[in-house]
Amino acid sequence: MKPVSIVEGQMAPLPDANIDTDQIIPKQFLKGVKRTGLGPNLFYNWAHDVEGEREPAFVLNRPEYAEASVLVAGPNFGCGSSREHAVWSLHDAGFDAILAPSFGPILENNCYQNGLLPVVLSEEDAAKFAELATDPANSVTIDLPAQQVSSGDFTATFDIDPHVKQRLLNGWDQVDITLQSVADIEAYESSRPRFMPALG
Amino acid sequence: MTRPQTMLDKVWDDHVVRSAPGEPDLLYVDMHLIHEVTSPQAFESLSLAGRRVRRPELCMATVDHGIPTVGRELGIRDPQSKRQIEALEQNCAEHGITLFGVDDLRQGIVHIIGPEQGLTQPGMVIVCGDSHTSTHGAFGALAIGIGTSEVGHVLATQTLPRHKPGSLAITVDGDLPLGVTAKDIILGIIREIGVNGGYETVIEYRGSTIAGLSMAGRMTVCNMSIEAGATAGMIAPDETTFAYLEGKPYVPTGAMWDEMVAFWQTIPSDGDAVFDREVAIDAAALAPFVSWGINPAQVVEITGRVPSPDSFDDPRERDGAARALDYMDLEAGTAMTDIGIDRVFFGSCTNARIEDLRAGAEVIRGRTVHPDVDAMVVPGSGLVKLQAEEEGLDRIYKEAGFEWRDAGCSMCLAMNDDILSPGERCASTSNRNFEGRQGRGGRTHLVSPQMAVAAALAGHFVDIREWQ
Ligand code: SF4
């Protein structure tokens, strides 16, 4: 995972509440065996009409948002299914961070695993950034070490789990971290109840 | 004196491998359930890093999401789904993981077959790369849905790092009115607390109504915990749980069984345990529900009407309702019983167990599916299908005009050919009425099995309580 520290770029507003992962990446794109190449299918049903033609009115299709790298979303963004394809497609489409009042619980974890920064803001702050994002000329800076987001002269702070923050700043892989505790895992295993099920 | 503990506290504490201040706890995973859609990239990462599966005997895999439910004997036609299924077969063979594959009678929806095989037991930590892993909480297990990277993490380490969520007790008391099912309980709960109401919590469902449910009903309730935004849902194990598990293939017998039951009896929350938040629901106030919108909190009693967006005070709910009515092509004020349907999907990990199929068949009583409706029944597993056939339920459904399919997720997420056409309206026993979930432009109404079958026969939603 690449380290994440400062994210700077253009915002794109998508502030509806409860945008679920079925919208972010519809099921027909879950049939692959790779993590790559999903960007063009991001929000497919909103970005394309039934004939597969691009919907020019959809915010992410508008030329003035072509460079957007920070999505400003509503509460419970990414609720629903566990499909990590949602995060892979956002990342592949050029997004490095999402600002929202809250996230679907599995999506939030999936973001951390991929170095996509989910920034949890208050409802008011998120609404302010959504408003700022309606002007494509406005850019945003997310400073992870300082836990601050700013656009123009508006600045908000955010909380993040210190452990996750360390991991993102250093680009550490969670499996590598956990494998440092292999002795603890072995110790636990030796005392596990023998009646728990096992296969094979 | 030790502090009284919730069931979550007990199961959590039992599984902490490592705990350090400021860090998530490292939890041991007792059972890792795997399916074809969210696992290939996890196995790929494992191979790229040169790692092995730490405990293959604590993994169980099956194929459910993309598998066809008809014509399987001809092979999997969709080349991409075929490749995914082959990838799982290869990964399981390479790592020594037990797979209930395409030709295995025990194949089925992962959340149906775990319990069916007795691999889901009280007091366990269970994970799966699937949000409806919450289903397994019905046994008093802590069951958490995870993404593909975390699937890879569990494969490599048999652990999951997590901060402990808060606790939310939802107490449902009283006798269930006639015609009101476990599905209606959970839809009623989600309407009450909202699609985000369980955020960063584990819900414990309790009270006399919950205790009175069969394991099938409890699984239906826990299944949709994720639809309330919760990390997991749990129900205390009791005699109903033990009776369900006794004799299941992976449940030991004899002295070991006694030892297990003694352990399971320690799992329920202590009587004086304190929850972070509590919600009380009166069972007598519940009714058969139908969803009218595009999230599972947008439901109304069958006797109700499609609400007007203006009836919501919260501006977000108002906007959400307006968007939903537009997508669903519904007029505010329409009686739910006046809504006609084109399709019926009876299946999914929410409602495709044998008890569901029996309850649906009861409704038929010699009637036939309305000529304008296409209806299908997709049993949750090969074994559910077999059992239903032994009981003659397949004949009842087929004679009424329902299609009788092979087990899989099917039109719950419509990754295979079981899919709504744009504009089609469907009564569905599944868990998600999201836009396009069952097919682009398709309109999903969530209901109980009984309500779905009644709608299939009538061609529109009907109040099951009056219809019997
Ligand atoms: S039946 Fe539906 S909700 Fe359940 S696991 Fe399959 S796709 Fe997911």
Image: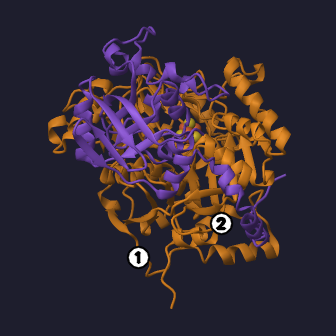
Chain colours: A purple, B orange
> Viewed as shown, does residue B389 lie left or right of B191?
right
Residue on which disc 1 sits = B274
Name the spot of residue B327 as percent of width and height, x first. 32, 25
User: Is disc 2 surrounded by few (<14), some (14 to 19) or many (20+) residues within 10 Å?
Assistant: few
Q: Quadrant of residue A46?
A: top left
In space, the residues marked 1 and 2 are separated at their CA atoms by 29 Å
Q: Can residue B179 be seen in the rendering of this structure? A: no
Q: Which of the pair A43/B406 is nearer the observer?
A: A43
Instruction: State whether residue B330 is above or below residue A166.
Output: above
Q: Chain of mark 1?
A: B
| Residue in the image at 20% along x and 37% along y | B318
Residue positioned most to the bottom: B1
| Residue in the image at 75% along x and 36% along y | B48
Give amino acid for label 2.
Ala
> Viewed as shown, does residue A14 lie left or right of B78?
left
Whichever of labels 1 and 2 marks the residue nearer the N terminus, that label is: 2
| Residue in the image at 51% along x and 34% along y | A87
Query: Of helix, strand and loop, which one carries label 2?
Result: helix
Mark 2 vs ligand 1: CB below 8 Å: no
Q: Quadrant of residue B174?
A: bottom left
Query: Of helix, strand and loop, which one carries label 1?
Result: loop
Name the spot of residue B427 as percent of width and height, x first. 42, 32
Q: Chain of mark 2?
A: B
Q: Which of the pair B116/B111 is nearer the observer?
A: B111
Residue on which disc 2 sits = B243
Foreground: disc 1 or disc 2: 1
Instruction: State whether residue B89 is above or below residue B211.
Output: above
Name the spot of residue B302 as percent of width and height, x first. 31, 42
Give amino acid for label 1.
Val
| Residue in the image at 63% along x and 60% along y | B125
